[in-house]
Image (cartoon, grey):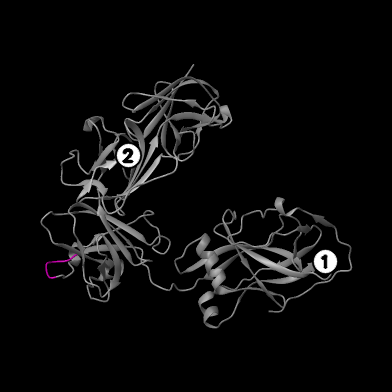
Amino acid sequence: MKAIKYLSALALTMAMVACDDFDLPNPPGQSYPEPEGYFENSGIVLAEVTEPLNLVEANEANKFVTVATIEQLVDFPENYTLSIDMQVAADNNFSNVATVATVIDDKNVTVNPDLLNGAIQSVKTKAPGTYEMPVRFVAYAELGTTRMRLGGIDATYCTETLKVTTLNADKVIEDAYYIVPCDANGKPQMNKAMKMNNTSGEGISGYDNPEFGLKFEVPADANYTFMIAPLSAVATGDAAADTLFGCLPAEDKMSGKLGVGYAPGPVTIFGDVFVTINMELDSYTVSYAFEMLYPFSGNVKVENMMKLHTDNYINYTGVAAINQLLTLAAQPDKNGDVIFKQSDAEEPVIDENGFLQTGLMTTGEGSTIRAPYKGNSLYWCDINLVQLTYSLYAIRSLSVIGDGNGWDVATATELTPSKDFRTWTATDVQIGSEFKINANGAWDVDFGGQVVNDATGNKVYNVYYKGSNLPCEAGKYDVTLDFSNVPYTVTLVKK
């Protein structure tokens, strides 16, 4: 590396800025020393690079790539050293940037191919390919530990678009994977392959989200085994041992490792099953895949039960009235096929405030889950059917809080619950421009969401756990929070 200095006989105007008040126009993707101020009248002229950059070739040749050249530097402070950072963005608005430190070699501004590749992965994609990447530069004058920004607090230079071929991935991850059931002899049945869904949505690169999942039905009398096939194998019908991923199960046979050469993986549960894979970690999990869970507690009838719902067949969440003792069922029958109880292998844990209880569940021999509060109470429930864990957060109070009361939990208006905890109400509540529903005067559990249309002329909201602040026209309202159906709702009737 050749560090260069540019000296100027011209007088400089130096404006000092406190470190705590200085911010780059866009937050950097990595942590770099903040400047102690800026040289307002000092500038630099950088020239664009028009040739495409091939990081594969540069890496193989063990060379840095040139991303700009220095054409001119004016009014540079004496005895300081020039340094330049490059900002790499996903779009021309530079709304999301990653910052890469450059190395100045003579008048060339160069970067390490690996660092540039990492920046592209962080703002755009991890999939190898050729991309047009908007970039711009920030220049500094450095003296010892002092770092001063050139040209002013928001100054950037040489906004350009670089055509970059990124590095090859360490391992190939395809954009689609399939579950392939095997016959009684362990032979993959490629004609029965079932496409898995990328858990981040359709069209997402497997490099950017290597997790895939699929719900399917396993007959009760089946000795079911499966393998995982990438899209390339399914497209050609290639069921060779070196093209499919087998399974190395953990002791519980509900999870394990994926790998070429492993035997087919067993599914030891039946009914609706959900299999997830992570091709970056070479792992898989098998879990139940129920549309909802039924929290049986006390004498609450199924039709009046506040059920737990899921959008991924892994986490089941919602509020439920629990009269201290609880069992969870996969069907509207507490004596049905699949019942979840407290595992005797591990004691449940209650937090120091007494609100939150966490524990491990089992579908085998176990005991009834005992919630932390005696008597009937409302709980926020979070069940993980992959890890077979649960958490119960006791909701002892709910209140309306917002800018109308300065977001002060001490003066928030409490809601009164119905006997079955399905509805919570308050009258003559003064609400400002936005509000939320808060539990227990803390922020462990709260509800927000968005406005929905309502023919009555009242203000109605769909609300969710940890949803957004609810916008409102300031005034006095009667408030009703309803947990009867999903989504939950809040209704405001103006007084």
User: Is residue 184 within the magenta segment?
Assistant: yes
Q: Which residue is mark 2?
A: 371
* Above or below 123: residue 479: above
- Span colored in magenta: 181-185
Relative placement, left or right, of 422 versus 107 is: left
Please give the name of the residue rendered at 40% of the width and 21% of the height, measured from the top-left corner: 456
Q: Is residue 92 magenta?
A: no
Question: Left of 2 or right of it: where is 346?
Answer: left
Along the viewing direction, whichever of 113 and 338 lies nearer the viewer: 338
Q: According to the image, label 1 marks what residue?
A: 77
Local SS, label 1? loop
Q: Which mark is residue 90?
A: none
Disc 2 on helix, strand or loop?
Answer: loop
The residue carrying pointer 2 sits among few (fewer than 14), some (14 to 19) or many (20 or more) residues within 10 Å by Cα, namely: many
- The residue depicted at 26 percent of the width and 51 percent of the height is 344
User: Residue at 60% of width from left, 55% of height from top?
Assistant: 94
Mark 2 and 1 residues: CB-CB less than 8 Å, in contact?
no
Q: Callout 2, which amino acid?
A: Ala
x%, y% of residue 71? 74, 71
Instruction: Give the mark nearest the N terminus, 2 or 1.
Output: 1
Q: Position of residue 114 (x, y in %)?
A: 54, 73
Based on the displayed image, in which of its 4 quarters is residue 231 positioned? bottom left
Q: Amino acid at mark 1?
A: Pro
Which residue is most to the top?
495
Front residue of 462/134: it is 462
Q: CA distance from mark 2 to mark 1?
A: 68 Å
Q: Is residue 401 above or below residue 112?
A: above
